[in-house]
Image: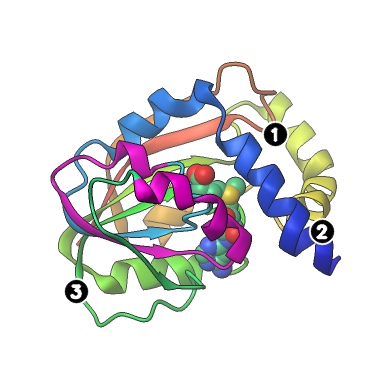
Amino acid sequence: MGIYREHVLPRMVNAACGMKAVAPLRRRVCEGLEGNVVEIGFGSGHNVPFYPDTVSRVAAIEPADVGWRLAEKRLRAATVPVQRSGLNGESLPFTDDSFDSALSTWTLCTIPDVAAALSEVRRVLKPGGTLHFLEHGLAPDEAVRRWQHRLDPVEKRLFGGCHLTRPIVDLLTGAGFTIAELDVFYEEGAPKFLGADSLGIAVSA
Ligand SMILES: C[S@@+](CC[C@H](N)C(=O)[O-])C[C@H]1O[C@@H](n2cnc3c(N)ncnc32)[C@H](O)[C@@H]1O
């Protein structure tokens, strides 16, 4: 499992997350990010080209060394400073109230203790700071949900602990965020069980 998790999986994630079809979604979720930003689950940096010029620096949190290495080309072309600043979204190495915005794309599905990670994001965001999110999770339709529950154990095993059935908006509100913007949709070209996305902005009180 070590070689698969540490070497094969990050490359699979890099290929899947690098699909051109999702570029417009990345552009949308990054719109309005500003100031000091923390990105949890940075992966191989596919959001880097979409950071707007209102961002002054990005602290990237990512456990996979391979992901970080695969990000090199995008990091060289980055227009804002990006620093790998931590390995685990469940425990962020920052003082309280140190960021203006946070970013998470297709990461809340995978972090083992997602409630702890959201609580950490709230802790390090300034009051009124925003979490921009683009996440797949529990589908709005019961028929799709049934398939998600059936396939969840396989998904978790093959894709490094990725869950199909996490209720993204409930997790955000349960962590104390207020949803300011939300779009729930099925991603074009993806099977519905995998592409039930929530894209929006959550505000930390
Ligand atoms: C499906 S990938 C998404 C990568 C990237 N956000 C993107 O949109 O291309 C999920 C990422 O979450 C990372 N991850 C897993 N556990 C994590 C944790 N505890 N804290 C932060 N990131 C984590 C994985 O290494 C992986 O890079």
Question: In this orientation, does residue 83 appear?
Answer: yes
Which quadrant does the N terminus fall into?
Answer: bottom right
Residue at 74% across, 37% down? 148
Q: Which residues are magenta?
A: 47-76
Mark 2 sits on what residue? Answer: 4
User: Does the magenta-highlighted stretch encompass residue 68?
Assistant: yes
Residue at 31% across, 67% down? 122
Dot 1 crowding, Cα within 10 Å, few <14, some 14–19, many 20+: some
Question: In this orientation, does residue 167 appear?
Answer: no
Of label 2 and label 3, which has the lower sequence position? Answer: 2
Amino acid beneath label 3: Asp
Q: Is residue 156 left or right of residue 25?
A: right
Q: Please tell me the numbered disc located at residue 97.
A: 3
Amino acid beneath label 2: Tyr
Horizontal and vertical percent position of residue 81:
25, 58
Q: CA distance from mark 1 to mark 3?
A: 37 Å
Dot 3 crowding, Cα within 10 Å, few <14, some 14–19, many 20+: some
Rendered image quadrant of residue 30: top left
Q: Residue furthest top?
A: 189
